[in-house]
Image (spheres, grey):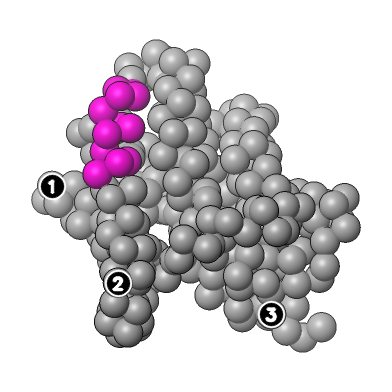
Amino acid sequence: MNTIWIVLPILTLLMFELGLNLKIEDFKLFKTRPRPVLAGLAGQLIVLPLLAWLIGMALGLEPIYLIGFVLIACCPGGSSSNVFSMLARGDVALSVSLTACSSIITLVTVPLIMGWVSMASGSAVNVHLPVGRLFMQNIVLMFLPIAVGIAVRKKWPAAADKMHAILSRIAFPALIFLATVFFIQNRDAIIDKFGQLGLSVSVLILLAMGSGALLSRALRLTGQERRTIVIEVGMQNAAQAIAIASSPMGFNNDVIAVPAIIYALMMNVILITYVAIVKRR
C-alpha cells in the first residue's frame, strides 16, 4: 500500500477543519495579550526543537530516528490541543490563537530546521530533504486548506459551524487510522525501538510541558493561560510530521515517521492524565 495517498488527504482534511475553527481575529491576539502568545510560541518554536535535539543526542538515537524525533518537535500544535485546553479549563481563545499562529509560522520554520537537521545527521543514513519542495508542499497541503477554511468561516459562518461539527468528529479517528496503517507497515521497527523511542518521547513531552509551565510563571501568566501553554507546548501535530516523513516532496521515508507514531500515542496518554489531575484539583 502506498501510504502517501492516505496521509495527504487526511492532513488536508485536518488543516481544513482547523481553518473552519479560525477567524482573522485569532491571529491578532498578540496585540492585546502579547505575554501568553509569546510564551506559547517560544515554547513551541524554540524550546521544543532544542529539547528534542538534546534528548535525542543524550539517549543515543540512531540518525534516522533522531531526524523523525526532531521533526515531530518542530511541528505546530494541532486542533486537538483546543479540545484539551477546554477540558483542562484553560484559555481556549489563547489555544486557538497559538494553533493558528504556529500553523502558519511552521510553514517556514519546519523546512529550515529540518534542512539543517538532515544535513547534520542525514548523511550517515543517506537521508536528504528537498527544502524548496517541502515548502511548496506546506503551502498546498496546509496553508491553502487553512485559508479556505477561514474564508468559509467568514463567508458562511453557519455552514462552517455545521462542517466543523462533522469534521471534528472525524479528525481524531482519521489520525488513529493513519497511525494504525503506519504501525502495521512499520511494526517491526516500532516494536524493536519502542522502548528507546517511547522513553525519548515521554521525556520530551514532560520536559516540554514543564518548560511551558516555567515560561508561564516567568511571565506571570494566569492559571488558565498557564494550563493552556502547558498543553500547547506538549501537543504537536503528528499528522503533519507523518506527512513530511513519508511524502516524496519531503523525506520520502516511512521509517522517519516512527517517532511521530509513538509520539501520537504517548502524547494522548500523558495529556489525558494531566487533564484528569487538573480536574481533580
Label for residue 249?
Answer: none
User: Taking 47 as reference, is 169 above or below it?
Assistant: below
Distance CA(mark 1)–CA(mark 3): 41 Å
Rendered residue at 67%/53% (across/down):
31
Q: Which callout, 1 or 2, points at the residue further toward the start of the chain?
A: 1
Q: Secondary structure at mark 2?
A: helix
Q: Quadrant of the C terminus?
A: bottom right
- Magenta residues: mostly which secondary structure? helix
Q: Are marks 1 and 3 in contact (CB under 8 Å)?
A: no
Mark 1 lies on residue: 2
Q: Which callout, 2 or 3, points at the residue further toward the start of the chain?
A: 3
Q: Secondary structure at mark 3?
A: loop
Rendered residue at 63%/65% (across/down):
94
Whether residue 1 is visible to the viewer of this picture, yes or no, is yes
- The reply, left or right, for residue 154 in relation to residue 58 is left
Q: Nearer the viewer, mark 1 or mark 2?
A: 2
Badge 1: how crowded within 10 Å, few (<14), some, or many (20+)?
A: few
Q: Secondary structure at mark 1?
A: loop
